[in-house]
Image: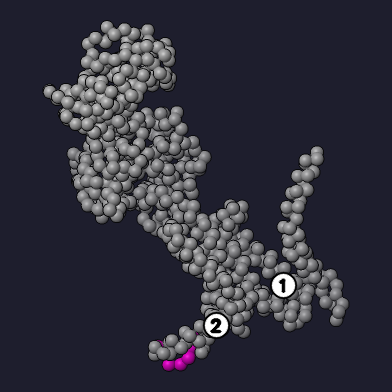
Amino acid sequence: MAHSTDLDLVNVIKRFGSHAAVNDVSFSVAPGEFFSILGPSGCGKTTLMRMIAGFEHPTSGDIRIRGQSMIGVPANKRPVNMVFQSLALFPMMSVGENVAYGLTCRGVSRAEAEERANRMLERVGLKDFGERRVTALSGGQRQRVAIARCLVLEPTLVLLDEPLGALDLKLREHMKIELKQLQSTFNTTFAYITHDQSEALVMSDRIAVMNQGRFEQVGSPRELYHNPATPFVASFVGETNKWQGEASAASNGSVSVRLPSGTVLQGQGKEANKTSLAFVRPEAIALAQDASALGALANRFEGRVSAVLFDGANSSLLIDTVGFEQPVRAVLPQAGPLAGIEVGAPVHLGWTADAMKVFAA
Amino acid sequence: MMTKSAQRLTLFLLLAPAILWLGLLIVLPHVEILVLSFSERVAPRVYAFGFGNYLEFFTEPLYWRTFARTAGMSILVTALTLVLAFPIALYIARVAQGRLKAMLLLLCLLPFWVSELVRTLGWMMILRETGVLSYVLQATGLTAERVEFLYNDGAVILGLVYGGLLFMIVPLANALESLEPAVVEAGFDLGGSRWTVLRRIVIPHAMPGIVAGSIIVFMLTVGNFATPVLLGGKNGLWFTEQIYAQFITRFNWPQGAAFGMLLLLLSSAIVWLGLRLTGQSLGTTLKQA
């Protein structure tokens, strides 16, 4: 029977004593979706995932998989499999036995389980690895075994608990792409938790940003990045400049924010007449050698480069700007007359009112 | 060159106590006993080299049967100790936290602050005809007569299991503690029942601890003297009693020495066989213990 959603959480609350680790969380995941829960450590995302897997029980609320309530269903009876942060491969078994384990638990005969395990290993690019010890594998190979061990059971939902955390940077970048490809070839629903915003942005169809036990915003990576709903999302997802000031005179969604130095900025926001936070992405800041090039922008300033943070395509500039206490962060132009800009060089900078999001502090 | 010889001297000095200990207290007496075991008594106070003392063991049924009985019961004691110790070790290693854990280990250790003799005498007070157990049974009206629980194989096994528990619990708890909780959770998550997880994940992981504990308990049990003598009485028939009898009662030291060597060799052979049958190597086991 087809169901329009694979996973539904309805008003789930989990308390440890008086502390609510997960506080009234509701969301749905559609079949085949790559859904991420992004949040800082201690935000409750691991507790949430353990409740879906069946290792913790919600204080109240309901968890449904394809419409079936999972309350009271033990972990080994749920159509959900988990890739653990430490991967938790069985060191006492070979690679093939690790993958066949779940099948033999279901009563599949030893020969058939081995056959299906080998086919699965082939699909994840580990053909002929069945006899190896899991301790003899590299980080990326162990990762694939952990995923193959889940996928071979054809679960409704695969949970992934920061599985890339232990890998080095290069491999992590590679595994991000590989995980996404695996998910689309198998067309299995993935629920992925991470504190790394780049992992979530690259892989997910939808992301829920979690903070202090609550969901701040659920949306596509682009939505979260370009239209954050809360100041937490604005500062947690992606790089950003943040200033505090007094907002005033909202008309038609536009707000002006007066910084403590007296500088006035033009932005977008709903709140007015109170202490507010203004956010601008570094890539939204336009740079120019003379002021006339920025004439159309609502916010125009001049400053002096105080640092060049070179990091390839992610390079940025810190610019000491008149009227700002902290240097403004902007993306280092990769081409054009400003590409070779050095520390101490004067520069003009500006951004549109649309690029600045203003929230009540 | 200077530093190298100085290093050697340091190493020698550091190892000296251990070498002296091993040499003087273990190797030397065993060599002495080995030599002694090959001297046959040909006439009063006249001894000659020969294998007679060893032949005596195989030709006199009392001796090899006593050994077979000792070995068989020791294996039974080891198995019972393992079965009893496993849940306790599992609880100490996986469930108990912090102070409770230390407390439980201390509780296991506590009886060992008293000498083995006193502990065994304690069991005698409980089990004998006029003892606590018999009294309770009579007082509650379950039996009309006094009941003797001492001087049978059951009492011997009880005493030996009691004495061996700690030596099984500690290596087991050690082995179980190193099992990552996520591995057990993964076992359940992939559909394993409690029994499957125990059989395929927990027990294989604890195997070095199981082997280490079993070797220690088996060796201690086979070589035990006081417990079978006190709790088994005349029915104890433990092989160590035969050695004692040769040395002390019959003044036949060469025969006693031969029995001593046989006990060492045969029990080592049983341990080796046990390791082969379970597919474990002594190396990994020693690392665990």
- Tell me where the magenta segment starts and ends, as one range: B142-152
Quadrant position of the C terminus of chain B in the picture: bottom right
At x 40%, y 42%, the residue is A85
Are the two marked residues, 2 and 1, in contact with CB atoms closer than 8 angstroms?
no
Say above or below: A173 vs A154. Answer: above
Same chain assignment for discs 2 and 1:
yes
Determine the image quadrant of residue A121: top left
Quadrant position of the N terminus of chain B in the picture: top right
**Residue B76 located within the stretch drawn in magenta:** no
Say above or below: A306 vs A239. Answer: above
Local SS, label 1: helix
Q: Which residue position holds label 1?
A: B259
Say above or below: A107 vs A357. Answer: below
Residue furthest left in the image: A252
Q: Nearer the viewer, residue A7 or A226?
A: A226
**Residue B151 located within the stretch drawn in magenta:** yes
- The colour style of the image is one colour
Local SS, label 2: helix
Q: Mark 1 lies on which chain?
A: B
Q: Distance between the residues labelled 2 and 1?
A: 29 Å
Q: Whole-percent x and y of residue A318?
A: 38, 20
Q: Whole-percent x and y of residue B259?
A: 72, 72
At x 42%, y 31%, the residue is A172
Q: Residues within 10 Å of mark 2 (few under 14, many from 20)?
A: many
In the image, is B251 to the left or to the right of A29?
right
Residue furthest front in the image: A261
Q: Which residue position holds label 2?
A: B124
Q: Which amino acid does label 1 sit on?
A: Phe
